[in-house]
């Protein structure tokens, strides 16, 4: 009998290993396929990705629904039914940002594997994580494991342009998708390994609020050979120069203070003491300047920011135009309403005669960490990677989680994939890529986290 039990145990381990290997192989192939589907936004064409997922669900015998918010702007969702606990949503977007092909060393939509990396637009943002979600969803379906809650797979359009043809549209037009949902996993967090081998997993719990603005100036037009005292262009230049000369003052919100404090644990004397008490450190102008120059990403977490991204004036070099404009990508810490920020900005540039037009402004929201989902992320990653730590983090970018937080769903940005210090990712840049070995490992890690939450 003992030998029989031992044989059964060994067979079970072998079957599990073969099954895991098969799922990893499937996931790599799915990711390559998905990268090769052109969903560059604009125009999006996310219905192409919807068709791909639909074929997979049909083959697996999973019921699903789809909806287009506009021609070609497809969304797809499926639900595995479980117990009465609040449902868990696995949220992804299938659109990707444009590419400048001349700066890539391969076809941006190739999905090829080179030197141990899966390459192509979306490998990181966020088709890779989307496939991790798919693999977990299908694994739970295939296993028939009893679920303590519904789990919802949701792949949407348009996140890269604001989400209004994706999650925003679905909340307004198909709110039934979110029935009973209480927790959600999305992009925005991830694992990182420093040079000493220390691993930290960031879990995004809030994000800087995107406030996209256009500065408009109108003045008397004329011939370029006869400059005027003021013009629409000089007014815009004056307003932009005012912004450059008056950076927004640093301030610390609770999640940022906690994040910096946790980061200080692995830092040396140069940064550690300041990060341990970042609220005090930012009172030192020298430190603020050093942070800005050496760590622009962290600098963006301690202040509101505006990046000058677009400008337009005359259509002809010798014509002074009647109208000029500039566009700003501003990101505001979530303790300040966007309307307050815009009013402060208008006051700052009041003397220039430039008016501010709001293109887009979201509302701030912060997700609590006292949930079973956050606890599962912490406990499972600690078990998988002894000595690793989990930190609640603030994202300088935005995701569709702002929609779901406004809808009352606790939303986290989490990806178990670990990126090594200095490793090239190419997110929104050139040669976007993800390590194949790290991606394969993340397939099982993501499943382990979700399984901990949905199966008692």
Image (spheres, rainbow, N blue to C red):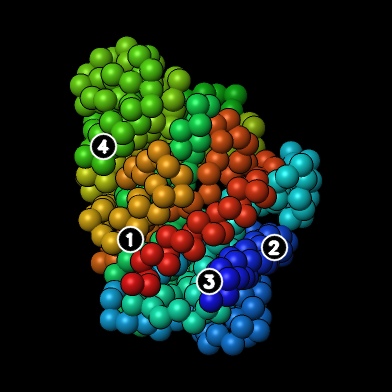
Which is more foreground, mark 3 or mark 4? Answer: 3
Give x and y (percent) for residue 173.
Answer: 39, 80
Residue 41 appears in view: no
Give x and y (percent) for residue 22.
Answer: 67, 67
Q: Is residue 49 left or right of residue 308?
A: right
Give x and y (percent) for residue 313.
Answer: 54, 38
Quadrant of the rendered image containing residue 393? top left
Give x and y (percent) for residue 319.
Answer: 59, 34
Q: Is residue 199 above or below residue 64?
A: above
Per the rendering, the mark at residue 258 is: 4
Q: Secondary structure at mark 2?
A: helix
Which is more foreground, mark 4 or mark 2? Answer: 2
Q: Secondary structure at mark 1?
A: helix
Q: Residue at x 43, y 75 (%)?
A: 152
Quadrant of the rendered image containing residue 126? bottom right
Badge 3 vs badge 4, beta-carbon distance below 8 Å? no
Closer to the camera, 218 or 119?
Answer: 119
- Residue denoted by label 3: 2
- Residue denoted by label 1: 373
Q: Residue at x 53, y 44 (%)?
A: 418
Spatial CA distance of label 3 from label 1 is 39 Å
Closer to the camera, 58 or 363?
Answer: 58
- Residue denoted by label 2: 25
Q: Secondary structure at mark 4?
A: helix
Q: Is residue 156 above or below residue 392?
A: below
Which is more foreground, mark 3 or mark 1? Answer: 3
Badge 2 vs badge 1, beta-carbon distance below 8 Å? no
Q: Residue at x 53, y 71 (%)?
A: 2
Spatial CA distance of label 3 from label 2 is 35 Å
Q: Is residue 188 above or below residue 257?
A: below
Closer to the camera, 99 or 207?
Answer: 207
Whichever of labels 3 and 4 marks the residue nearer the N terminus, that label is 3
């Amino acid at each position: 009998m003992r030998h029989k039990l031992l044989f059964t145990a060994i067979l079970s381990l072998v079957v599990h290993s073969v099954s895991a290997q098969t799922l990893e192989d499937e996931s790599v192939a799915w990711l390559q396929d998905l990268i090769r589907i052109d969903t560059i936004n604009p125009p999006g064409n996310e219905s192409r990705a919807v068709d791909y997922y639909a074929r997979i669900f049909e083959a697996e015998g999973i019921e699903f629904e789809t909806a287009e918010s506009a021609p070609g702007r497809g969304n797809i969702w499926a639900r595995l039914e479980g117990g009465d606990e609040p449902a868990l949503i696995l949220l992804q977007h299938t659109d990707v940002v444009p590419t400048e092909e001349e700066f890539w060393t391969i076809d941006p939509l190739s999905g090829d594997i080179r030197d141990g990396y899966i390459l192509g637009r979306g490998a990181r943002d966020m088709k890779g994580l989307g496939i991790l979600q798919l693999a977990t969803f299908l694994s739970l379906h295939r296993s028939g494991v009893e679920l303590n809650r519904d789990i919802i797979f949701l792949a949407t359009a348009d996140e890269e342009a604001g989400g209004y043809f994706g999650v925003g549209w679905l909340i307004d037009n198909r709110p039934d998708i979110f029935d009973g949902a209480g927790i959600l996993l999305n992009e925005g967090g991830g694992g990182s390994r420093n040079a000493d081998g220390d691993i930290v997993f960031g879990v995004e719990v809030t994000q800087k609020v995107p406030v996209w603005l256009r500065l408009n100036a109108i003045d008397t037009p004329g011939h370029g050979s006869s400059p005027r005292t003021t013009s629409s262009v000089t007014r815009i230049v004056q307003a932009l120069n005012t912004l450059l000369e008056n950076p927004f003052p640093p301030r610390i919100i609770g999640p940022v203070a906690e994040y910096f404090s946790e980061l200080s644990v692995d830092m040396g004397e140069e940064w550690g003491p300041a990060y341990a008490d970042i609220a005090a450190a930012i009172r030192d102008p020298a430190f603020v300047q050093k942070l800005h120059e050496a760590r622009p990403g962290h600098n963006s977490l301690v202040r509101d920011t505006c990046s000058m991204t677009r400008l337009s004036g005359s259509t002809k070099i010798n014509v002074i135009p009647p109208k000029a404009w500039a566009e700003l990508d501003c990101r505001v810490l979530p303790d300040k309403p966007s309307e307050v920020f815009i009013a402060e900005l208008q006051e700052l540039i009041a003397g220039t005669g430039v008016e501010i037009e709001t293109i887009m402004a979201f509302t701030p929201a912060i997700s609590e960490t006292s949930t079973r989902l956050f606890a599962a992320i912490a406990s499972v990653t600690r078990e998988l990677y002894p000595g690793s730590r989990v930190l609640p983090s603030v994202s300088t970018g935005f995701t569709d989680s702002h929609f779901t937080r406004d809808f009352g769903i606790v939303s986290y940005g989490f990806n178990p994939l670990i990126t090594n210090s200095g490793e090239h990712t190419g997110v929104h840049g050139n040669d976007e890529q993800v390590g194949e070995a790290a991606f394969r490992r993340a397939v099982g890690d993501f499943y382990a986290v979700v399984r901990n939450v949905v199966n008692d």
